[in-house]
Amino acid sequence: MRGNMELTIIEKDNIQIVSIKGRMDTFSAPLFDNKISETIDAGKSRFIVNFSKLEYISSAGLRSILLMAKKLKSSNGKVHLTELTGSVKEVFEISGFGVIFQIFETEAQALAALKEII
Amino acid sequence: MAKITIPAKLEYLGEVIQFVTKQAASFDFEDQKIFAIELATEEAVMNIINNAYPDKSGDLEVECYEENESLVIEIRDNGIPFDLFSAEDPDITADIEERQVGGLGIFLIKKTMDHVKYRRESNSNILTLTVHK
């Protein structure tokens, strides 16, 4: 099924851990935008996005991740990315997102690095 | 050889991707190639949906065939001329604030397909994407 995405956000030590499962494409990306905007607007500023269960991402999904980072940057927040694998990882690399984002092998590493900030 | 014609509207995107991945299935591609085929199709079709027909509605046609043991995906529209090679690549070294939000779709097509060709024929844009086995 196209556009099938599951999004869960768990708070840990005042850090929002966002896990995306399934597909992040033209159909599902707006869902991500809405949920993240809501959470940032509610005053949350530190995020980790875990991609371990993401099977597919297109430019629509990359756009959402970039918009999230821009929004957080302007409100002094921060997002770390983690557990990118396979073709999803490749698409991030091609797009130059490795330069823009801090990408960590494991969620624990992403969490530790984020805790050091502020 | 198989062909599908659909209105250039978002609600038909899923149908096109499904059509192309079904054609690709007989090629026994690795998962990585299937990902790339799906990605390039989504990006190319979305580009037509968003840009080809600014003042009217129109169709797009996708044809898949085998050539020299490769899958060829040919995407046609009768919209305004658009040569994706004239589009500037995004600056992938820019940081978060400067990084442009658009332009990635076309760039991903160029980077993930084995061969990309554009031609304008009578009133049509014809984009030919080739994926080697």
Image (cartoon, rainbow, N blue to C red):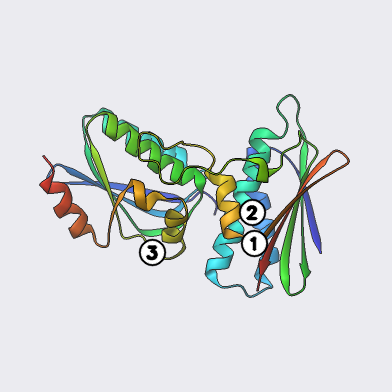
Q: Which numbered circle lies on residue A85?
A: 3
Q: Which element is circle 2 on?
A: helix
Q: Quadrant of the N terminus of chain B?
A: bottom right
Q: Residues within 10 Å of mark 2 (few under 14, many from 20)?
A: many
**For mark 1, what is the residue?**
B21
Q: Nearer the viewer, mark 3 or mark 2?
A: 3
**For mark 2, what is the residue?**
B17
Q: Are marks 3 and 2 on the same chain?
A: no
Q: Amino acid at mark 2?
A: Ile
Q: Residues within 10 Å of mark 1 (few under 14, many from 20)?
A: some
Name the residue at 41% across, 46% down: B93
Name the residue at 62% across, 60% down: B113
**How many angstroms separate mark 1 from mark 3 (CA)?**
22 Å
Q: Amino acid at mark 3?
A: Thr
Q: Position of residue A100 (x, y in %)?
A: 35, 46
Q: Position of residue A103 (x, y in %)?
A: 29, 54
Is the Cβ of the residue at disc 1 closer than 8 Å to that at disc 2?
Answer: yes
Task: Tell whether A48 sits left or right of B79.
Answer: left
Q: Quadrant of the C terminus of chain B?
A: bottom right
Q: Nearer the viewer, mark 1 or mark 3?
A: 3
Is the Cβ of the residue at disc 3 closer than 8 Å to that at disc 2?
Answer: no
Q: Which element is circle 1 on?
A: helix
Q: Subunit of mark 3?
A: A
